[in-house]
Amino acid sequence: MRVLGLDAGLAATGYGVVEARRNCFEAVEWGVWRTNRLKGMDKKLQLFCDELRKLLKRWKPDTVAFEGIYHFKNPRSAFMLAHVRGALMACAADFGIDVMEVAPSRVKSMITGSGRASKEQVAYAVGALLGLSDDVPFDASDALAVAISAAMELEGRRRIDER
């Protein structure tokens, strides 16, 4: 099973493609799309959709997984993030790919054992699970964590369905 995890943000969106076989995981591509040089929401969303389309064509994932919404103190930030997530979800839907969300605390719990883990702890655990070096940016390691936890959840559902 191939899962693309996305850690959506307006200034930077992390992505990570993971190949999952049972409980063995391999990172096949990861990185961060940055929009800080672009002016206007439309240009930023266009960049994210263009980059996502390239990934979807190259890797043909079975599922695109997003980290679920978490609590925001600033409503404007939540609103801006909703634009990014909506555009990316629509793009994945155009390809006929299943989209799912995994709650942030569930991602952290599945990856580190603690639903309150720090970004550093998540990055370390992702690196250990995938055999990666320490130079993976936080946005990308978060996206890889989302992909791994989604794959684990989907594998668990598949096992239940087989019974």
Image (spheres, rainbow, N blue to C red):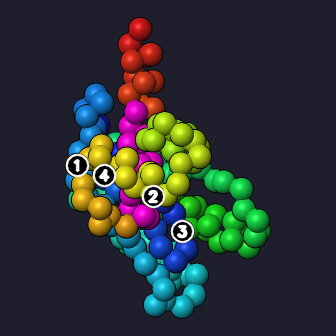
Q: Is residue 141 magenta?
A: yes
Instruction: Give the mark, 4 or 3, whose residue is nearer the N terminus.
Output: 3
The Cα–Cα distance between marks 4 and 3, rounded to whole angstroms, is 22 Å
The amino acid pointed to by label 2 is Glu
Tell me if label 1 and label 4 are in contact, CB under 8 Å.
yes
Pointer 4: what residue? 127
Q: Is residue 131 magenta?
A: no
Per the picture, the main secondary structure of the magenta-coloured stretch is helix
Pointer 3: what residue? 9
Q: Nearer the viewer, mark 4 or mark 3?
A: 4
Pointer 2: what residue? 120
Q: Nearer the viewer, mark 1 or mark 3?
A: 1
Other residues around mark 4 within 10 Å, as few (<14) / some (14–19) / many (≥20): some
25 vs 147, left or right, is left
SS class, disc 4: helix
Q: Which residues are magenta?
A: 138-152
Question: Is residue 83 placed above or below 25 in the rendered structure?
Answer: below
Pointer 1: what residue? 131
Write the residue at 62% across / 67% down.
Answer: 81
The Cα–Cα distance between marks 1 and 4, rounded to whole angstroms, is 5 Å
114 vs 152, left or right, is right
The Cα–Cα distance between marks 4 and 2, rounded to whole angstroms, is 10 Å
The amino acid pointed to by label 3 is Gly
